[in-house]
Image (cartoon, rainbow, N blue to C red):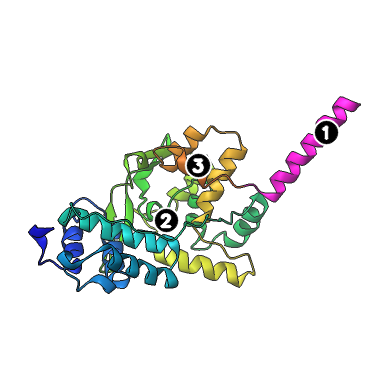
């Protein structure tokens, strides 16, 4: 710690973020800067040489009263990475808030059909189809151009994110696994090719998609859920169709099946009822 005894926590975090600017996405850097300003200000003026475990734990405790465990853990992760860079010999043990198991609402097939009838021929139709039928992230939807449509399907080559200045920036997919080709039907291919813009498939931003999606659900008295949940619907439907998890992960741009196993395995009431009927039928066949 002696080499950086005059550096404050804020300076250490700022320098850490600056060192990652060339390798991390603009949206990640923006998130780091926001977390630094919003959550870690408590420690900003403390010099690293004066920092101890008690001060860090006190700051984490204060954050835990106001924010979710995920937010607190993410803020601590940024602090820890910065201290590792500028004070690698500083050893400390911090108790973090316990993780809360995430719960996801995922619409079933009947809900998707109802939504599509209402959303058809609106500005949200294309984003809705790309999320629910292709499993695309909003950032991937907004980056699609007509030349992404090939004979093999829909090629995912880039994403659009919002930088710290509120501007759209194109970047490569989240990881190497993000480069992929999604199978699409001839009807969907025609819809995508015939969108009004000559180049882009979706001309509205990811932020506008989220805002308009919430407004659409409220307007029609539908259950409110995040637009991103349509991606979960795609994964869950693939599971119900019996597609191996490895292939689902590849289609969704994941490098492993971890997210499929931990996040996307939802059971739909309608599907569960169907399975119950099948089980009862098997019993009848045995006894009959």
Q: Report the side of 227 relative to 115 (left or right).
A: left
The residue labelled by disc 2 is: 138
Residues under labels 3 and 2: Cα distance?
19 Å
Quadrant containing the N terminus is bottom left
User: Disc 2 on helix, strand or loop?
Assistant: helix
- Nearest the viewer among 18 and 209 is 18
Label disc, if present, on residue 281 of the rendered structure = 1
Whether residue 129 is visible here, answered yes or no, is: no
Q: Which of marks 3 and 1 is nearer the N terminus?
A: 3
Residues under labels 2 and 1: Cα distance?
42 Å
| Residue 136 placement (x, y as % from top left) | 45, 49
* Tag in front: 2 or 1: 1
User: Disc 3 on helix, strand or loop?
Assistant: helix
Where on the picture, by quarter, is residue 277? top right
Point 18% across, 64% down: residue: 14
Q: In this view, does 133 lie above or below 16?
A: above
Residue 48 forms part of the magenta stretch:
no
Whether residue 100 is visible here, answered yes or no, is: yes
Q: In this view, does 284 lie above or below 170?
A: above
Label disc, if present, on residue 260 of the rendered structure = 3
Q: Is residue 229 above or below residue 221?
A: above
User: What segment carries the magenta color?
Assistant: 267-288
The residue at the far left in this view is 3
Q: Do the residues labelled 3 and 2 touch (CB within 8 Å)?
A: no
Dominant SS type (magenta): helix
| Residue 178 placement (x, y as % from top left) | 36, 42
The residue at the far right in this view is 288
User: Disc 1 on helix, strand or loop?
Assistant: helix
Residues under labels 3 and 1: Cα distance?
30 Å
């Amino acid at each position: 710690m002696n080499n950086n005894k005059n550096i404050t926590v804020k300076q250490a975090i700022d320098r850490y973020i600056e060192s990652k600017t060339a390798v991390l996405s603009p949206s990640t850097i923006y998130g780091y800067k926001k977390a630094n300003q919003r959550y870690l200000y408590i420690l900003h003026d403390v010099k690293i040489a004066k920092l101890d475990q008690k001060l860090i734990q006190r700051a984490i405790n204060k954050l835990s009263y106001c924010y979710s465990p995920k937010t607190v853990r993410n803020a601590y992760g940024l602090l820890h990475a910065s201290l590792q860079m500028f004070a690698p010999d500083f050893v400390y043990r911090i108790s973090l808030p316990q993780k809360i198991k995430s719960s996801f609402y995922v619409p079933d097939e009947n809900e998707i059909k109802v939504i599509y009838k209402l959303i058809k021929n609106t500005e949200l139709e294309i984003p809705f189809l790309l999320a629910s039928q292709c499993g695309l992230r909003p950032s991937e939807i907004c980056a699609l151009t007509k030349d992404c449509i090939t004979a093999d399907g829909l090629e995912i080559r880039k994403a659009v994110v919002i930088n710290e200045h509120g501007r759209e920036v194109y970047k490569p997919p989240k990881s190497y696994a993000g480069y992929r080709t999604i199978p699409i039907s001839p009807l969907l291919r025609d819809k995508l090719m015939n969108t009004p813009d000559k180049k882009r498939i979706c001309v509205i931003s990811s932020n506008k998609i989220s805002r308009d999606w919430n407004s659409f659900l409220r307007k029609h008295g539908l259950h409110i859920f995040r637009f991103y949940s349509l991606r979960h619907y795609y994964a869950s439907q693939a599971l119900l169709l019996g597609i191996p998890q490895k292939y689902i992960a590849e289609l969704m741009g994941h490098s492993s099946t971890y997210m499929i196993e931990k996040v996307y395995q939802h059971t739909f009431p309608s599907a569960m009822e169907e399975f119950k009927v099948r089980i009862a039928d098997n019993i009848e066949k045995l006894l009959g």
